[in-house]
Amino acid sequence: MTAIGARPTDAQAVPKRVALALAVALVWWLVDLALLRTGTPHPLDDLWEDGLIARALLAGHGFWTPMLYPPLWAMRDPATLTVPVLVHGPLLPLLLTPMVAVFGARAIDHVAWLAAAAAWLTAYFTARTLQRAAGATVAAVAVLLLTFSPILLDAVNHSFSVVVGALALAIALDALLRREPRGVTAGLALGLGYLTRSELMLVAPLVALAAGLAPRQWLHFGAAFLVCAVPWWAHHFAVVGSPFFNLSSYTVVGFSHAFPGSSLMRDFALTPDRWPAFLQSNLGALPPKWLESFPRALKRVVVTPGVLTGWLVGFGLFAWLPRPGYRRLASAAMFIALIPVALMTVTVPQPLYLVTFLPLFAIAASIGAGALVEWFVPTVRIARWWPAVVVLLAFAGVIPTLLVARTEARAARDLLASERAALAKVPATGVSPLFSDRPDFVAWTTGRPALWMTSDEYDALYPRFTAEHAARPAGLPAVRDSNLTWFHDGHWAAGRRAR
């Protein structure tokens, strides 16, 4: 076996074991998307808003979206009924622009293929990094630990942004963890990744510290990152007065008993300028939320990359800590692994946050498996089977997720067909926005701006059984009109008008 503490070289040849693992990964994604057709998007997926922004870019409107968030209602452009993009980053809309131009209204239906390509490239760059540090066998195992991760399967099918984040991290690790680190490449990778996953701004300095960059390399790395990030900060500063504001910050207080779910992101009164004072006045509500969310976040981390392989990650970090030249890397990896734990504790307990960090988890798990063999397996004859055992564990762990994904994809195809048929009756033009709990999908399908709210919130805004008019923000329709609504009674429920 190759020693897991071998010093990295910059050799680029792909060994047969790694090539075989990458071929298996390619077949896996082809089976997933072409044979099982699990990549059908759900109307609740975030991809629809990325498509809306891409459509706005093609129309020459810039980074504005017809998915209308109530806190941004006062910032709308009355001519187009759009609001500035203050939730999603700009990278995915830019990537989707060619697809939207070519495929039109069905462009989002095919995004899973892009996500699968990004997942395969993530495995490739992860293998390159690990091949130099630990040899071909460990690198090949990491490829399949990553590919057979249940959360990566979910992300490829429904959450392109976190897969792009994982690819950015994998490219950065490959560029930095070598004898001659490539600071510019790593900075560009993480800078572009930041434009889809903002948590990569926290990852960037830790990865650079792990690589032990010289001052000049630090300068190149930082400059490359800033070249990507500064224009987006300028956009935010221009529209809201703060370069780092994001409407998703509201989830810091939201998803709690005091403010359940994403209700704060649908509050007309909580405009961006009121957010700092609101946060300060609700700091007391945060510790109870953290105490409730932290155990769930920790549970999700210990089953990453997979439910049967997550326990290997700790052994991998422990194996590298005492080895000369790797203590800094292992320490940085530990701190980086805390970032998704913090995100799931402080904001939303969403396991997809972990996908961006999967390259590190796959690296640590494969190294941990190799280390356990070195420590405890007495004979080479038995030891040579460890890669197959680990890969089988990973494969067994992902099969239930694959079967569920296949069933849900069938339901999603039926749901999309019925939703599209019903929404085709909505006029493509109108002076008023639509109201929906799935506003990005509704806006994408109808071509009309859509305001995000639940059925109950619409009833509060437009009471059904009283002649009194509720206080409403300026610019909204004067009277209740169920023809402008599209709500749902559950995750798989068909849409309906307000009753």
Image (spheres, grey):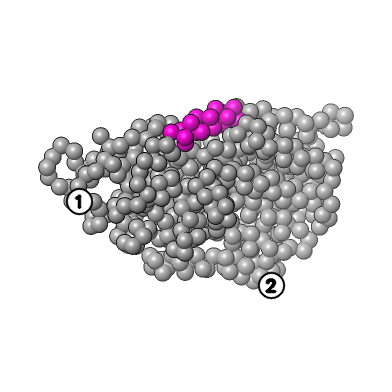
- Residue plotted at (43% across, 31% down): 492
Task: Please tell me whether mark 1 sits on a helix, a strand or a loop.
Answer: loop
- Residue plotted at (39% across, 32% down): 494
Is residue 416 covered in magenta? yes
- Residue plotted at (87% across, 32% down): 380
**Residue stretch in magenta:** 401-419
Q: Position of residue 225 (x, y in %)?
A: 60, 65
Query: Which label sits on residue 478?
Result: 1
Q: What whole-number distance in Å separates the C-alpha atoms at marks 1 and 2? A: 61 Å
Residue 329 left/right relative to 455: right
Residue type, numbered disc 2? Arg
Q: Position of residue 344 (x, y in %)?
A: 48, 44
Give the position of the N terminus as an image quadrant. Answer: top right
Q: Residues within 10 Å of mark 1 (few under 14, many from 20)?
A: few
Closer-to-camera residue (312/487): 487
Dominant secondary structure, magenta: helix
Query: Which label sits on residue 72?
Result: none
**Up-down relation of residue 310 to residue 479 (above or below):** above
Q: Position of residue 330 (x, y in %)?
A: 67, 50
User: Do callouts 1 and 2 mark residues in contact (Cβ within 8 Å)?
Assistant: no
Residue type, numbered disc 1? Ala
Quadrant in the rendering for residue 238: bottom left
Task: Please tell me whether mark 2 sits on a helix, a strand or a loop.
Answer: helix
- Residue plotted at (56% across, 49% down): 103
Give the position of the C terminus as an image quadrant. Answer: top left
Query: Which label sits on residue 216?
Result: 2
Q: Residues within 10 Å of mark 2 (few under 14, many from 20)?
A: few
Closer-to-camera residue (3/141): 141
Residue 229 visible in the current orientation: yes
Chain-order first, disc 1 or disc 2: 2
Residue 478 left/right relative to 23: left
